[in-house]
């Protein structure tokens, strides 16, 4: 049996989907094949990289990809991590299981650098829990 294939979708594939991608791979421990993409591509946010590094996960090698790059790839699960991605999600075959959770966009945080990073950490922890729970619920094959 092949590894379950997961696509994480967001608006710009810069923060939330990148963080989720990192955690799904981390908690999946090689048992899942994960990709992330956006309706648009904004580049991987340096604060997302920094906040994940604080938790021991390196996403600095990730790239920001457009969902259309994966149009022909067979996924088992698609997780949308923002309402915009859910509303603008392209068509996926019915066999693909769709999941949605709207996480706050930490890139929209305002204030001092400490306040902005505090928001990145808060959202990171929400995504971390979601991804850990998601992996724990996956059927073991």
Image (cartoon, rainbow, N blue to C red):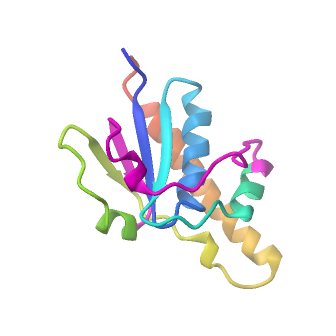
- Which residue is pictured at 57% across the width and 35% down the height? 25
Residue 82 visible? The answer is yes
Residue 71: percent from left, percent from top = 33, 47
- Which residue is pictured at 63% across the width and 57% down the height? 124
Residue 81: percent from left, percent from top = 45, 59
- Which residue is pictured at 60% across the width and 61% down the height? 15
Q: Is residue 140 above or below residue 100?
A: above
* Quadrant for the N terminus in the image: top left
Residue 37: percent from left, percent from top = 47, 54
Residue 80 visible? The answer is no
Q: Quadrant of residue 119?
A: bottom right
Q: Quadrant of residue 87?
A: bottom left
In screen coordinates, is 65 left or right of 94?
A: right
Does the magenta-highlighted stretch encompass residue 138?
Answer: no
In screen coordinates, is 96 left or right of 12?
A: left
In screen coordinates, is 24 left or right of 139?
A: right
Front position in the image: 132 or 107: 107
Q: List the single residue furthest toward the bottom.
A: 111
Boundaries of the magenta span: 53-82
């Amino acid at each position: 049996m092949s590894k379950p294939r997961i696509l994480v979708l967001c608006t710009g594939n810069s923060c939330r989907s990148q963080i989720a991608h990192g955690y799904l791979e981390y908690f999946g421990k090689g048992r899942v094949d994960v990709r992330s993409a956006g309706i648009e591509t904004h580049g991987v946010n340096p604060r997302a990289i920094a906040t994940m590094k604080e938790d021991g996960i390196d996403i600095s090698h990730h790239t920001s990809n457009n969902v259309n790059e994966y149009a022909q790839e067979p996924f088992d699960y698609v997780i949308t991590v923002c309402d915009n991605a859910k509303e603008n999600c392209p068509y996926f075959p019915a066999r693909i299981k769709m999941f949605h959770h709207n996480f706050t966009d930490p890139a929209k945080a305002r204030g001092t650098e400490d306040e902005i990073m505090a928001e990145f950490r808060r959202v990171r922890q929400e995504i971390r829990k979601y991804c850990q729970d998601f992996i724990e619920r996956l059927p073991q094959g």
